[in-house]
Image: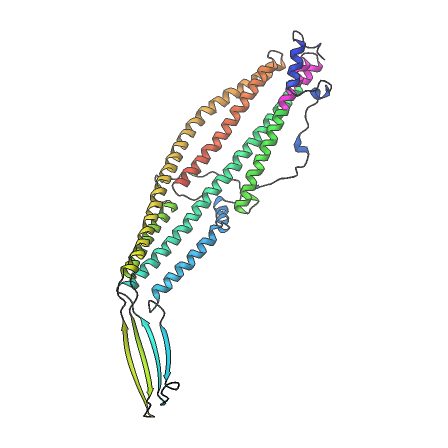
């Protein structure tokens, strides 16, 4: 086995082969190329097909429809409907009726009888009805903004999911291309080995490189399956749009972002609830209308009467203080969330602008690198076949060409992804 390798120390060669995992008792391994794993069916496979007639916007509506937050929005809708009912009601609270009867059968027993019926009617406080109507309108607007915010959240999830699949598919395509290229190089080495032009060591070296490329291809395939599974979980679909590119939005700020508008709506709603609390810090006065019928103990005739009763609750600091404090705390929480969101949106917009600018500059440089590396490898391939270049130099140039191609295709996708991220930062839906 070693007579073909001249000028190589035998012990060093054995150590090198052992490090590469080559069994000397099985020389056929060095002569036989690895079979593709793709020939064998995989036990676990998640497939997402491309559909040219499917748009990102259509998929977005599907993501929104099955998003778990829909249950919360439905509950908020019931609360908004309840506020509207309260604002449109004729009375601030439900009226109440009461009945009573009194006699002296168990005491004096003089046949004295008394029957009484009453209705208690709550009265609106000054400005209460208008304040409730305002809160109902603010709650309705807040709900609308929350629904738009959910769409924007779903757009972020969808954009990341589809572009991750695009990146993983690109990695798989490149891994497959490198594997096929190394197989072709290995075939050339085999031909030269049979012709006695190269040592068997080069055959084993190309086999190792091909096995490594096969391993990278398997890893890339697995990563693509994971990305496709996450897409299926998000959308409930087994198809995705064939076109993912978006046009760069002309917006320059985040003030139209649904996230920002929803946070502002929550502050206004909290302020409206505080204003309503200032009015409803005391109970509503009530008007009671009653009728009374009495049959006297010494007179069998009935005596009927009607009366009015007004109840005006007094304001108490014990009741007022916790209500106002709770309302002010809600405003503070809403303003804190608004300020926190402002910082997050500013950071996201700055990063999106900067990353898009830098990625475009990098793309211009990578395009030149790829062109040079591709031409170098093509020349090196010809030189190796003519015996003007050794295998190590060829493999090094092939690796450089592969890395340059991977950088170029990945950067092209990254630029488009960064455009989508910028659109997301300014609040534009796909």
Residue at (57% x, 36% y) in the render: 224
Query: Residue 199's spot in the image, x, y percent?
Result: 67, 13
Query: Residue 130's spot in the image, x, y percent?
Result: 29, 62
Residue at (34% x, 45% y) in the render: 336
Tell me the magenta residue range.
188-210
Q: Is residue 407 above or below residue 93?
A: above
Q: Is residue 411 above or below residue 335?
A: above
> Please, which residue is most extreme toward the front here?
107
Residue at (40% x, 43% y) in the render: 428
Q: Can see residue 243?
A: no
Q: Is residue 233 above or below residue 123?
A: above
Query: Residue 389's spot in the image, x, y percent?
Result: 59, 12
Magenta segment includes 278: no
Q: Can see residue 154?
A: yes
- What colouring does the structure picture have? rainbow
Q: Is residue 169 above or below residue 306?
A: above
């Amino acid at each position: 086995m070693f007579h073909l390798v001249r000028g190589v120390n035998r012990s060093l060669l054995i150590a090198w082969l052992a490090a590469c995992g080559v069994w000397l008792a099985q020389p056929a391994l060095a002569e036989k190329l690895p079979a593709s794993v793709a020939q064998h069916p995989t036990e676990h496979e998640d497939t997402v097909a491309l559909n040219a007639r499917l748009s990102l916007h259509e998929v977005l509506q599907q993501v929104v429809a099955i998003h778990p937050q829909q249950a919360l929005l439905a509950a908020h809708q019931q609360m908004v409907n309840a506020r509207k009912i309260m604002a449109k009601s004729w009375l601030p609270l439900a009226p109440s009726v009461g009945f009573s009867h009194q006699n002296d059968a168990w005491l004096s027993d003089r046949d004295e009888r008394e029957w009484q019926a009453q209705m208690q009617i709550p009265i609106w406080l000054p400005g209460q009805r208008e304040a409730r109507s305002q809160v109902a309108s603010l709650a309705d607007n807040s709900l609308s903004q929350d629904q738009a915010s959910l769409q924007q959240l779903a757009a972020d999830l969808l954009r990341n999911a589809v572009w991750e699949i695009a990146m993983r598919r690109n990695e798989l395509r490149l891994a497959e291309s490198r594997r096929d290229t190394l197989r072709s190089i290995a075939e050339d080495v085999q031909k030269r080995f049979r012709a006695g032009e190269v040592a068997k060591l080069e055959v084993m070296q190309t086999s190792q490189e091909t096995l490594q490329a096969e391993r990278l291809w398997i890893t890339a395939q697995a990563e693509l399956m994971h990305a496709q599974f996450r897409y299926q979980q998000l959308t409930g679909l087994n198809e995705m749009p064939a076109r993912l590119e978006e046009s760069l939005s002309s917006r320059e700020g985040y003030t139209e972002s649904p996230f920002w508008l929803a946070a502002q709506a929550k502050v206004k709603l909290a302020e409206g609830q505080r204003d309503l609390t200032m009015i409803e810090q005391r109970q509503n006065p009530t008007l009671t209308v009653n009728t009374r019928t009495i049959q006297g103990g010494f007179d069998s005739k009935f005596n009927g009467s009607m009366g009015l009763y007004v109840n005006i609750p007094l304001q108490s600091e014990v009741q007022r203080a916790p209500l106002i404090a709770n309302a002010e705390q809600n405003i503070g929480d809403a303003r804190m969330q608004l300020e926190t969101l402002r910082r997050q949106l500013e950071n996201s917009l700055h990063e999106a602008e900067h990353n898009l600018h830098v990625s475009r500059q990098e793309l211009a440089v990578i395009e030149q690198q790829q062109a040079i590396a591709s031409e170098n490898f093509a020349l090196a391939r010809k030189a190796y076949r003519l015996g003007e270049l050794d295998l190590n130099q060829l493999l090094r140039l092939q690796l450089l060409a592969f890395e340059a191609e991977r950088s170029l295709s990945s950067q092209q996708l990254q630029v488009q992804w960064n455009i989508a991220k910028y659109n997301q930062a300014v609040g534009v839906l796909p």
